[in-house]
Amino acid sequence: MSSDRLSSTILVKEHETILKVIDALDRKIEEFREGNLIDVGFLRSLLEFSRVFIDKCHHGKEELCLFPCLERRGIPRENGPIGVMLMEHEMGRSLVRQINERLDSYVSRHSKTDFERILNLCSEYIELLRQHIYKENNILFPMGDGVIDEDDERRNIECYEKREHELGEETHHRMEQLAEKLKQEAKQ
Ligand SMILES: [Fe+2]
């Protein structure tokens, strides 16, 4: 089977979109620090991208489609790579919630403590996602490609399509556009 038909290839491509946004956030953090001011609009859009694209579109496919398939094929969840990936997804969700709460507080009070805390949480989020994506791309997905067969591939892709349909057909495209917008904003 050619690699562009593998169900993991679709997820690797989504990782590229996620990394584009994470790189944009990294550049914006520098700007926030230099200007001593947070671009609230940028960060709110980034949190929307995280909640919708990273969590629902992407982690949804992993948690409800690929990972259960890998488990059926013998890759362990408890004390294994899938368990670690699931734990890191939870850490990401928690960081997004914390950034959101701090941002609300920053908007109403503009305190230095909130400013510093938001920058630190964003750095933590960037680091978490970069190393998480590296582990999936270079360890878990190649491991999975070695144990799943053509029927699994077909079922996974059908499962991905079902997820996208449930989220609304235009959601994925809207998120790709948002990723590009965030990248452009971080260039200015
Ligand atoms: Fe992933």
Image (cartoon, grey):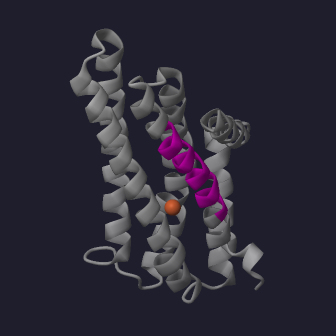
Where, by quadrant of the figure, is residue 155 drawn?
bottom right
State whether residue 99 is above or below residue 163.
above
Residue visible at 75% across and 74% down in the picture? 5
Q: Main secondary structure of the magenta part?
A: helix
Residue 129 in the image: state x and y as whole percent. Answer: 44, 56
31 over 86 or under it: above or below: above
Q: Is residue 100 above or below residue 153?
A: above
- Where residue 105 sits, quadrant-wise, is top left
Q: Is residue 131 left or right of residue 172?
A: left
**Residue projecting furthest to the front:** 34
Residue 96 percent across, percent down from the top left: 37, 39
| Residue 23 among magenta residues | yes
Is residue 88 rendered magenta in the image? Answer: no
Q: Which residues are magenta?
A: 13-28
Q: Is residue 13 above or below residue 46?
A: below
Left or right position of 17 against 1 = left
Quadrant of the image containing the C terminus: top right
In the image, taking residue 45 as reference, residue 93 lies left or right, namely: left
User: Residue 101, position in %: x, y?
Assistant: 30, 26
Quadrant containing the N terminus is: bottom right
Give the residue drawn at x 35%, y 24%.
Answer: 103
The residue closer to the viewer here, 95 or 120, is 120
Residue 175 in picture, x, y percent from top left: 65, 39
